[in-house]
Image: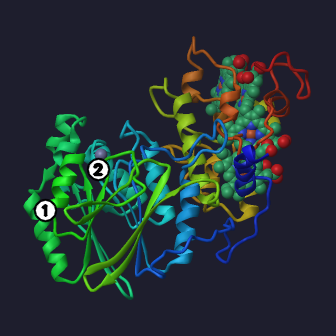
Amino acid sequence: MVRYSLLAALVFVAGCRTQLPPSADGRKDIPLKLVDVRAFKMGQPDAVLMLTGGGGGLLEVCNCSGPMPGGLSRRSGLVRSYRQAFADTILVDAGDAFWIEPTDIRNEYMLRGFRQIGYDAVVLGDQEWAAGHKRLAEMLAVNKTPALSTTVIGPGVKAVRAVKREFARAKIAIVSDTRREAFHFVPKPVVSDLLFTEPVEIEQRIAELKSQGYIVVLIAHAGEESVEDMAARTKADLVVRGHTTRTNSKVATINGKPVVKVGGYEYVGVVAIKADGDKIADLEYRAELVNTKWPLDGKLLLTYQAYAHAAMMKALDAERKTGLEFQASASCGKCHKKQFANWKKTRHAKAYATLQKAKRTGDPSCVMCHTSGFGTKAGFYTFAKTKHLANVNCQNCHRFNEAEHRKKGFAIEPVGRDICQTCHTPITDPKFQFKAKWKKIRCPGHGESTDGEVASAE
Ligand SMILES: [Zn+2]
């Protein structure tokens, strides 16, 4: 049973059949059962720095052969548990959060997830810049996850040069150094659009922050040797090595400088700091494994589901030359009267009313499956503007445009299981059975009565 507890949890947190208690703002929030965090030997730290990196676009783990560590929803459970235990925390990703194909839509969801977890910043590494400054700017603008880039500047990309926090007993500043050499696999034209500062300039900036009384953390997004070199020379108080998929269990010391190495989706590196003015008086480090001990954050699961839904739809429509021009079911129904009458009797025609009843019409993570084409150019936008696209309309299943299907020789594909499963997922419909459900919703054929027998369902 433990083995399948993830699935059970998925059903619990997002379960479309589960009625969740409404929170103060009228939305139904998923209660999170936070867990106790191990105390530090130093006692109560003055600041806690939480670090991730090198996630490589992985939103959730598959748990294929039993529970696996990682996934944004458990990471969120861990981070929230730490925030409950310690008031003064900072959470930063050291970069390479993006998938190997940096323009892939999953990266938008990665950034959305980071915002939901409440990251203070994501460092822009070579993987992020590899998307090209235009696409990167677009993704950051939509998702509003704060980006940190101290040494690389790209036209239009909004990034802060330093993250600064002033806590009761510690002032912490974080800067990043993403080196040109880390861009080894990034196409030259993409790199040539970017501006790199000289190493001396970052030391000037660090000196400036030191003079303002900050403990300075340098996130080095570079190869092993450069990091050693930086650690030996920098005036920063702590060096964090990104651009890796390995997390060390202990702090390394290079020329008396503490160096922490964090990467891969399985771990969150946690640094507890006792401050003495602008110096680190005491430092304790631990690599926290993102395992089942941490609670799943349902909000993040919904973000993962939104990604899966969008990616599946995209794959289904990959061969299309133009987007779907979504129209009202009634307008298809002008010619297909029988099918329209049938559709009106199905739950698909009442899907939006369900959200109205649940007071969740303002939640994109619900709207995407209970309307037509939400998130695409010609799809549902708001009820006021696109009332006719509320509900699961004809084109959610018949994925073509009216004009093209009436052209001679247009091959109309049967509506298969894959299409249903973009919405009937293991989360929303854990016991989905294609044949049984198909019988409930399939449209009547020519001259066939609504309750006529089906010949074949696949
Ligand atoms: Zn990198």
**The image quarter in which residue 126 lies:** top left
The image shows residue 238 at horizontal and vertical percentages of 27, 67
What residue is drawn where x is 18% and y is 78%? 210
Label 2: element kind: loop
Residues under numbered marks 2 and 1 in contact, where contact means CB atoms less than 8 Å apart: no
Badge nearest the viewer, 2 or 1: 1
The image shows residue 392 at horizontal and vertical percentages of 69, 43
Relative to 223, residue 414 above or below: above
The image shows residue 312 at horizontal and vertical percentages of 57, 35
Which residue lies under the disc numbered 1?
Answer: 233
What residue is drawn where x is 67% and y is 62%? 360
Label 2 near ligand 1 (CB < 8 Å): yes
Amino acid type assigned to the residue bearing label 2 in the image? Gly
| The label number, if any, that marks residue 119 in the structure image | none
| The label number, if any, that marks residue 125 in the structure image | 2
Amino acid type assigned to the residue bearing label 1 in the image? Arg
